[in-house]
Amino acid sequence: MRIYDIISRKRDGFELTDEEIHFFIDGYVKGEIQDYHASALLMAIYLKGMSDREMVTLTLEMAKSGDMLDLSAIDGVTADKHSTGGVGDKTTLIVTPIVASLGAKVAKMSGRGLGHTGGTVDKLESIEGFDVALSPERFIETVKKTGICVVGQTGNLAPADKKLYALRDATATVGCMPLIASSIMSKKLAAGSQCIVLDVKYGSGAFMKTTDDAEELSTKMVEIGKMAGRKMAAVISDMDTPLGKNIGNTLEIIEAVETLKGKGSEDLREVSLTLASELISLVKGIDYHEARQLCEKALDDGSAYEKFLEFISAQGGNTEQIIDTDNLPKAKIIHNVIAKENGYISKTDAEKIGSASVVLGAGRVNKEDSIDYTAGIILHKKTGDRIKAGDVIAEFHTNDEKLIAPAEKVFFDALTVSESKPVESELIYKVIR
Ligand code: URA
């Protein structure tokens, strides 16, 4: 078999065989197939697409290219939740203790923030002592004991995806539905859980800008997961506007704890409860409404909050910072952002708000950059709210005075103010099961 022939077959619109896809992934990971061949094949896939069978085979080959986590030592049903990424998205911190308090076993690998989006691992690391780098043995032991463990992704999880994603980034082949679906699902399948709920975001702060694209991606990923024997659901949720009101690592821990104590923003509570209920429905084999009642009870009676404390403690985190979030470190400077005009906020562009938060120090531009855990933004007003000139519409938290002016520029660029109240977008657009 020759990679040259595989490229030309895909270029001419033929379906690749399972053997050809195996040959490509195996050879590319081993370094026997060069980047220029892989780039040409990716572009051919981008232009000609893939059948469902090709996409499933590609996903499984990428999943098998490195470590496949073995969760069989864990008694009970394993559950995972994945978001395609957003701004202010701290739902993992709320969903995982809800479902673990109801008996699901959450063995989760999470990522760090990059660009305008945040990452769960950074948020958890903003808690003093919290360890995201447990050994595989401690990872499994912690899930067995507390029902949750969240660690950073190991270096050898789906290495084919790691290599191919970097190449796609450099060759204008990222925005291709079968390649995105196989990239995300290869990591989820390698991470081993039996039940997987995907939170597929749409809108300005998301990878998928339209509901149609989000639906197509969701359908493909659910299909792949089911064909690989997993129980799947995908929730398509709005990321045109940041989720909740706090953006930034420590600030998001504070808002997650508020939500677990019954005081969080309504949109954050709703998305978290929807995701948790879909997961519990899969884990327990019950319908959504029954699962929803269980999840609401777990959130409202404090059992999810108690589970969260147990989870933080099991991974070495200082629970005094959770019991009273005033014990978390704070930024030295809190700057009030003042409205310049009267009207309704008709748009809060999530990507730009995320970028303003990165300017304040909360995120990374390059992978190796360090971040300021205490930096970020608290939104006092969001899309749909009426504002008057002089109102405090947001707080900037930062440790560097010089960052305020550039962050304000990006922030105001994100806002559109209009005379009439905008039509509300749908927080949960659809669920694909
Ligand atoms: N996230 C991924 O992990 N892969 C993609 O291709 C796009 C988003």
Image: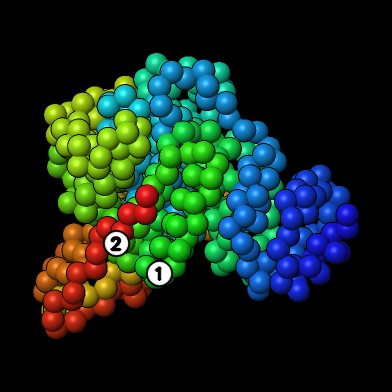
> What whole-number distance in Å separates the C-alpha atoms at marks 1 and 2?
10 Å
Measured as percent of width and height from the top left, residue 41 is found at: 75, 65
Report whether 168 appears left or right of 330.
Answer: right
Question: Does residue 117 show up?
Answer: no
As drawn, the residue found furthest toward the right would be 2
Toward the viewer: 324 or 224? 224
Going from N to C along the chain, the mark reached first, 1 or 2, is 1
Secondary structure beneath disc 1? Answer: helix
The spot of residue 301 in percent (x, y) is 14, 29
Mark 1–mark 2 contact, CB under 8 Å?
no
Residue picked out by circle 2 = 429
Q: Is residue 204 above or below residue 297?
A: below
Relative to the observer, which residue lies in front, 154 or 429? Answer: 429
Q: How far across and down, in percent of the image, does residue 236 sit?
A: 35, 57
Which residue corresponds to the image point at 21% horizontal and 64% vertical from the top-left? 382
Q: As shown in the figure, which amino acid type bears the numbered disc 1?
A: Asp
* Label drawn at residue 305: none
Task: Return the residue nearer the eye: 69 or 216.
Answer: 216
At 37% from the left and 20% from the top, the residue drawn is 146
Q: Give the tally of numbered discs.
A: 2
Mark 2 residue element: strand
In this view, the residue in front, 32 or 289, is 289
Mark 1 sits on what residue?
A: 212
Image-quadrant location for residue 258:
top left
Q: Quadrant of the N terminus?
A: bottom right
Residue appearing at x 13%, y 81% in the figure: 420
Q: Is residue 248 above or below residue 106?
A: below
Q: Position of residue 179 (x, y in %)?
A: 60, 59
